[in-house]
Amino acid sequence: MYKLKKISIGMVGILLIVVITIVGIFAFREWQKIETQHREELQIKYEQSNFALGMNAYNCYKDFSNVDVNDLIISLAAYKHFEKDVEISVEDVKEFLSSEYDKKGKPYVLNPPDNIAKYIDWYNFLGGHLLRGKYFIYLSRFQDDNKEKYSFESLYILYEKLLYELIEDFENCPDRKSYEIY
């Protein structure tokens, strides 16, 4: 009887170890699945953010030094042209890209400032990248008609100050609509 009780306790112990191991394996697999989903979501957010902010679509954090500033200036100008009453600047983007993590240690890309988030959504999901292409054509036409002031250089290699001037002159041009034929 004593031997039977010992065997029963041993069997229960083994069964308990097996059950705990199985539950542990399932829990670990579920944790891995959640971690993989989180990592993939983060990579997608980085791709979207980087693409909209004038960089290649890297799937990881890149700081402002990777931004094609002229490309960003043109994109932000297109955003302001097509979406009235929006406020976003190159300095806002520079600040956003100044750190990978916020004060709580979370990736900044998951919780960007409102103006940055709206711009990224516009660029990636609301046709902004297509409108940006149109705007580039408008600016190029305007530049061609004013080559004595803006030269023949591509918009991508103009000095930033001159590019800002070109954009401002285009936006304030009395016959701006004539350049907006697509």
Image (cartoon, grey):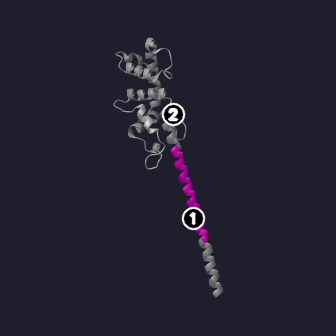
Residue 117 location in percent, x, y?
A: 42, 39
Task: Tell me if residue 173 can be seen.
Answer: yes
Quadrant in the picture for the C terminus: top left
Answer whether residue 22 is magenta in the image: yes
When the figure is inspected, residue 25 is found, relative to residue 117, above or below; the finding is below
Residue 77 location in percent, x, y?
A: 41, 27
When the figure is inspected, residue 117 is found, relative to residue 172, above or below; the finding is below
In the image as oriented, which residue stretches furthest toward the top?
148
Q: Residues within 10 Å of mark 2 (few under 14, many from 20)?
A: few
- The residue at the point 46 percent across, 39 percent down is 98
- The residue at the point 47 percent across, 33 percent down is 53
**What type is the residue that disc 2 sits on?**
Ser
| Residue at the spot of label 2 | 65
- The residue at the point 62 percent across, 80 percent down is 8
- The residue at the point 54 percent across, 56 percent down is 31
Quadrant in which residue 179 is drawn:
top left
Q: Name the side, left or right, on which 144 lies relative to 27.
A: left
Which label sits in the foreground, 2 or 1?
A: 2
Q: Secondary structure at mark 2?
A: helix
Answer whether residue 30 is magenta in the image: yes
In the picture, the disc for residue 23 is: 1
Q: Secondary structure at mark 1?
A: helix
In the picture, the disc for residue 106 is: none
Residue 90 location in percent, x, y?
A: 43, 31
Q: Earlier in the sequence, mark 2 or mark 1?
A: 1
Give the main secondary structure, helix, strand or loop, of the magenta stretch.
helix
Residue 129 location in percent, x, y?
A: 47, 30
Q: Which residues are magenta?
A: 17-42
Q: Residues within 10 Å of mark 1 (few under 14, many from 20)?
A: few
Quadrant in which residue 9 is drawn:
bottom right
Quadrant in which residue 28 is drawn:
bottom right
Quadrant in the picture for the N terminus: bottom right
